[in-house]
Amino acid sequence: MKNFIGIFMIILLMSSCDVQQKKEAKLPEVDVDVETESGQLPTFDVDWADVNVGTKTKTVKVPKVVIAMEEVEVEVPYVDVDMPNSGEKEELTLTVEAEVSDKEHTIEIQEIVATNNNLYVISELNETDQKIGDKTMRVSDRVILNAPDLNVKHIIAGEKPDEVFNDQYKYVKDIAEFKSTLDNTKVIYTR
């Protein structure tokens, strides 16, 4: 089998080019006195196959995601928090987003809960009946918070969509069960 493949490769190489001998081979002349005259190796003019590399226009199907962003003025909840012994406050925009596919979704911040040095932004993600096909879209909600610097953690009630973007948030099925694990909580915002 190896010999067959080798012969096939030689035939393939020989048939893919045009070889024309330009000079004949001449062996060196040898004298008994060991004097030699230089010989000549044959020379060949080899014309290889012409290869052109370029581009060609072809119609193919590719996935296309269209996300249109535009600036609009909206009413955003504003929460001013004064905590004992907290020092300076700063204004933060707490934004929650989810990237979804198949059907449109809504996401809303339901409440913000403070405990120790943590703020839990609790949101709810709901699927609608409106199909979006093979596209993906992002839905978001936001609250402006004027408070001391605290650790912000996002908790979303609902089924976590498959997109990798959603890994930045914690998804839970039951908010009441999650909140039962927190100690000394104070609700500072409710929708």
Image (tube, rainbow, N blue to C red):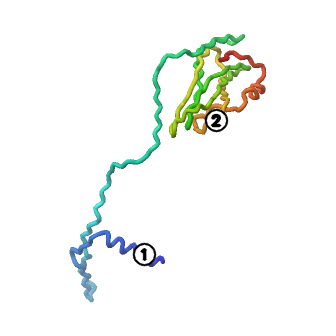
Vertical order, 45 against 75 (above or below): below
Q: Could you tell me residue 49's position as x and y percent?
A: 29, 64
| Residue appearing at x 76%, y 28% in the figure | 177
| Residue appearing at x 48%, y 77% in the figure | 1
Query: Label 2 crowding class (10 Å Cα cut-off): few <14, some 14-19, many 20+?
Result: some
Q: How many marks overall?
A: 2
Vertical order, 38 against 155 (above or below): below
Which quadrant would residue 121 be assigned to in this image? top right
Q: State left or right for residue 7 relative to residue 183.
A: left
Please tell me whether mark 1 sits on a helix, a strand or a loop: helix
Vertical order, 62 against 10 (above or below): above
Camera-side residue: 24 or 175? 175
Q: Could you tell me residue 65's position as x and y percent?
A: 47, 37
Which quadrant would residue 114 be assigned to in this image? top right
Q: Could you tell me residue 126's position as x and y percent?
A: 62, 30
Q: Which mark is residue 182?
A: none
Camera-side residue: 71 or 12? 71
Please tell me whether mark 2 sits on a helix, a strand or a loop: loop
**In this figure, which residue is indicated by the disc labeled 2?**
160
Residue, far left: 22
Q: State left or right for residue 76 relative to residue 37.
A: right
Vertical order, 16 against 87 (above or below): below
> Disc 2 and disc 1: Cα gap in Å?
58 Å
Q: Quadrant of the C terminus?
A: top right
In the image, what residue type sits under mark 1? Gly
In the image, what residue type sits under mark 2? Lys
Q: Which mark is residue 6?
A: 1
| Residue appearing at x 56%, y 28% in the figure | 139
Mark 2 or 1, nearer chain start = 1
Residue, far bottom: 32
Q: Could you tell me residue 125's position as x and y percent?
A: 63, 29
